[in-house]
Amino acid sequence: MTNKLTDNTSDHDLLIRLDTKLERLSEDIKEMKNTQASRIGSVEQRITSLEDTIQNSSPQNTRVLTEANAAWIHDFKLTWKTMMTLASAIGAVVGFIISAIVQIFNLFGR
């Protein structure tokens, strides 16, 4: 009789341990499910954002903008070179006039 009681007790203890482990396993699975669901939601948001970006940017529009930027850069460089040439010429003329005035004053002894 004591042998049977011992067997029942050990079976009962084993069932309690199994039940506890199954509860932990169930909680871990729920936690993994929640984590994966949030990660999938995050990936879906990123994919939606990328799809919107692709739909809003067409290759033709990008080509037109690139050509417009290239034309603007060319015009800016041309304008910059013209302004630098004019500034250099004006500086040379002003320098020449100042040196001529200094030489005239030196001739008259001042």
Image (tube, grey):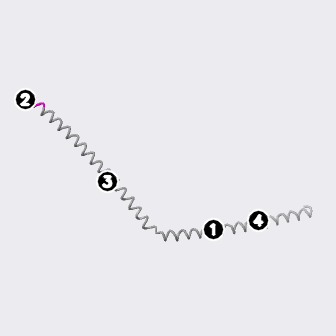
* Front position among marks 2 and 4: 2
Q: Where is residue 61 drawn, in percent x and y?
A: 49, 70
Report the residue marked by disc 4: 91
Q: Where is residue 28 drawn, in percent x and y?
A: 27, 45
Q: Where is residue 6 drawn, in percent x and y?
A: 12, 30
**Label 2, label 4: how far apart the Cα atoms are:** 121 Å
Residue at 18% in and 38% down: 16
The amino acid type found where label 1 is placed reads Phe
The amino acid type found where label 4 is placed reads Gly
Residue at 17% in and 35% down: 13
Which quarter shows the N terminus? top left
Residue 1, label in figure: 2
**Label 1, label 3: how far apart the Cα atoms are:** 53 Å
Q: Quadrant of residue 93?
A: bottom right
Q: Crowding at label 1, few (<14), some or many (≥20) Cα neighbours within 10 Å?
A: few
Report the residue marked by disc 3: 37
* Front position among marks 3 and 4: 3
Question: In this image, 92 relative to 50: left or right?
Answer: right
